Image (spheres, coloured by chain):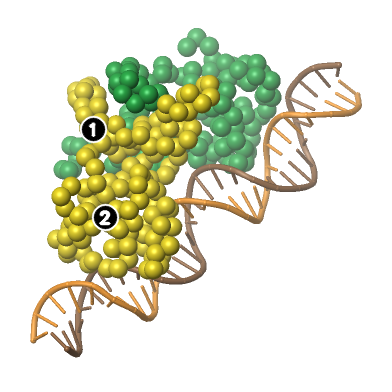
Chain colours: A green, B yellow, C brown, D orange
Amino acid sequence: MSTDPVVAATRALRERGQRVTRPRLAVIEALATLDGHPSAEAVASAVATTSDAVHRATVYRTLDRLADLGVVTHVHSSHGTTSYHLADLAEPHLHARCRTCGTVVDLSADLLDDVRRKVDEANGFDLEPGHVALSGRCAACRAGDHD
Amino acid sequence: MSTDPVVAATRALRERGQRVTRPRLAVIEALATLDGHPSAEAVASAVATTSDAVHRATVYRTLDRLADLGVVTHVHSSHGTTSYHLADLAEPHLHARCRTCGTVVDLSADLLDDVRRKVDEANGFDLEPGHVALSGRCAACRAGDHD
DNA sequence: TCGCGGTCTGAGAACCATTCCTGGTTGCAG
DNA sequence: CTGCAACCAGGAATGGTTCTCAGACCGCGA
C-alpha cells in the first residue's frame, strides 16, 4: 500500500475516461477515512458533514460507478445492506456478519477455495466468495447470551 | 417426508399456542405449493390469487412467525431479498444465487463444515451457513456470456 | 353449544434506502 | 477560452417491508 488510495482511485477514474469531480473525490476520501465496512448510507452521512455537501443520490451513483471500475469493493450482507470499501485498502478477504450485533469480521481470502472448487465440480457454479458476507454469531455475542 | 408439511406446520403452531387461522393456512399452503425459493412478495401474490385474499402485511407477519417456529427457513440473498421455504420440504441445504439470472442453486449441507470449524477456531465466530445464500454465477450464465 | 378473552387480521399510511428525472453545472479536450 | 458532453443537485417517485388500531375470529371453558 505504498500508493495513496485516493490517488490510485482518481487515476483509475481517468484511465477509464471518467471525470474526477469534487463529489467523487469526497466519496473516495470518505471511504479512505472510514474504518471497517461502511454502508452507502454511512458514506452519505460522512460526506454530508464535509465542506462539500454531496447529494445522497450522487453518493449512491458514485459508489456504483466506482464498484464497476473495480476501485471499490462492495459486499452484500444479511439484511440487504451493502457495504463498500476501497479495493486498495486491504488484501482481498471474505466477510462474516454477526446476525446479532451486525459486526463484520474479516476472514482469510482462501478460506473458501476448496468449497469453490467443489461447487464448480458438482454444480458448475462459479462461486464468488467475497461478494456476500456469511452470517453467524461473533464471539462476543455468543458469550453474551445463550442461544 | 411421510408427514404432510401443512399438517406439520399447523401442529407446530398449536404446540406454541399460536392460532391456526385461514390466512396462515393460506400462506403455508402457498409455500407447500410453490417450487423453489419464493420471496415474501412471491408468496404474497400467490396467496392473492386464492379464494382467501390475505393482506400483504399478514403474509409478512406470518412468514416471520413461521420462521421463528422453525417451520419455514428463510434465506437472505444478495439483493436484499429474502426467500422462504418449508423446513420439512427438503433436507437442510445451502444456497447459492446466480448474480446474473437470480436462480438459486441448492448445495449440500455439509459443504461448509470444514470452513465452519476453521472460522470457529480462528475467530471464535459461529458460522450459520444456511442463513445466507452464497453468490456467484450459474453454469448457464457462464456459458451464455463471457465475464 | 355459547360466550369470553385475547390473538390475529385488514386497511392504509408510514417508513427507509435507493433510484429516477430534469434542468443547470462543470471537467476537460482542442 | 470555448463548447460539448458528462455530471450533479434537488426533489419526487419507487418498492418492499413494517406500523397502528379497530374490528374479526379462534379456541377454551362452562
Vertical arrangement, residue A14 with respect to residue A134, above or below: above
The percent coordinates of residue B42 (x first, y second) are 42, 52
The percent coordinates of residue C1 (x first, y second) are 17, 89
Pick the residue in front: B82 or B120. B82
Residue B66's mark?
A: 2
Vertical arrangement, residue B134 with respect to residue A99, above or below: above
Q: Residue at x 38, y 25 (%)?
A: A125
Give the residue type that dot 2 points to: Leu
Q: Residue at x 60, y 35 (%)?
A: A61
State the CA–CA distance, disc 1 to disc 2.
22 Å
Circle 1 is placed at which residue position? B109
Mark 1 Cα-neighbour bin, 10 Å: few <14, some 14–19, many ≥20: some
Which of the chains bears the disc numbered 1? Answer: B
Pick the residue in front: B125 or A141. B125
For residue B11, which quarter of the picture? bottom left
Q: Is residue A65 left or right of residue B53?
A: right
